Image (spheres, helix red, strand yellow):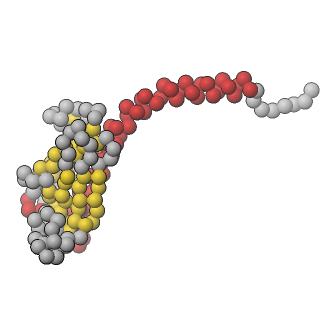
Amino acid sequence: MKNTKGFTLIEVIVVCVLIGLMATIAIPSISGWLPNYRLKAAARELYSSMQKVRLEAAKRNVDIGIMFTTVTYPATGGGYTAFIDDGSGTGGIASNAIQDGSETTLFHVTMPAGCSLITASFSSVPRTGYNSRGLPLGNRVGSAEMRNNKSKWYQLSLSNSGYIKIRKSTDGSSWN
């Protein structure tokens, strides 16, 4: 009798059925987890973007503004744009946290699918930034909030010292 190696057809079919059953069980769990992961990633990206703007303002010795575009929930989307707020070009006004004239755009970020940037209020306006010393531009402090359709919220708040804090909530009113 020969020494044969390999798998029988029955063994292969049993393994395929087991993989199919595990995938059937795992897919609903992953689809519930994905929106929360996207929202958390969007909050961390905003945090990183604001840190980058702060460092760029100090490095370039210029004011850099951030303008936010919000949406009304349940619409998804929104985003923010960072730009050098030096007043360059016709009609440009320096240090007003509004991209006017021909001020240079550094980057633009749009919220990922299923996420909404619902509020941005920095001293009652949807814009802020940093001056060359790393402090909030025009002393515009406040917060930006984002949420998804799975009842999760993230809030990024900016203090007078330029410190950024991320907090989360499951009801939009009590923050951790």
Q: Position of residue 29 (x, y in %)?
A: 42, 29
Image point (28%, 62%), residue name: 107
Question: Residue most toward the right?
Answer: 1
Foreground pick, 52 / 15: 15
Q: Quadrant of residue 15?
A: top right
Quadrant containing the C terminus in the rendered view: top left
Q: Is residue 22 left or right of residue 55?
A: right
Q: Position of residue 130 (x, y in %)?
A: 16, 63
Image point (22%, 65%), residue name: 83
Question: Residue most toward the bottom?
Answer: 89
Quadrant containing the N terminus in the rendered view: top right
Disc count in the image?
0
Image point (50%, 26%), residue name: 24
Foreground pick, 78 / 167: 78
Q: Is residue 154 above or below residue 161?
A: above
Q: Position of residue 39 (x, y in %)?
A: 30, 42
Q: Is residue 166 visible?
A: no
Q: Is residue 160 above or below residue 172?
A: below
Image point (40%, 33%), residue name: 31
Q: Is residue 114 visible?
A: yes
Q: Is residue 91 above or below residue 150?
A: below
Q: Position of residue 116 (x, y in %)?
A: 25, 43
Q: Is residue 123 left or right of residue 163?
A: left
Foreground pick, 99 / 50: 99
Q: Is residue 142 left or right of residue 39?
A: left
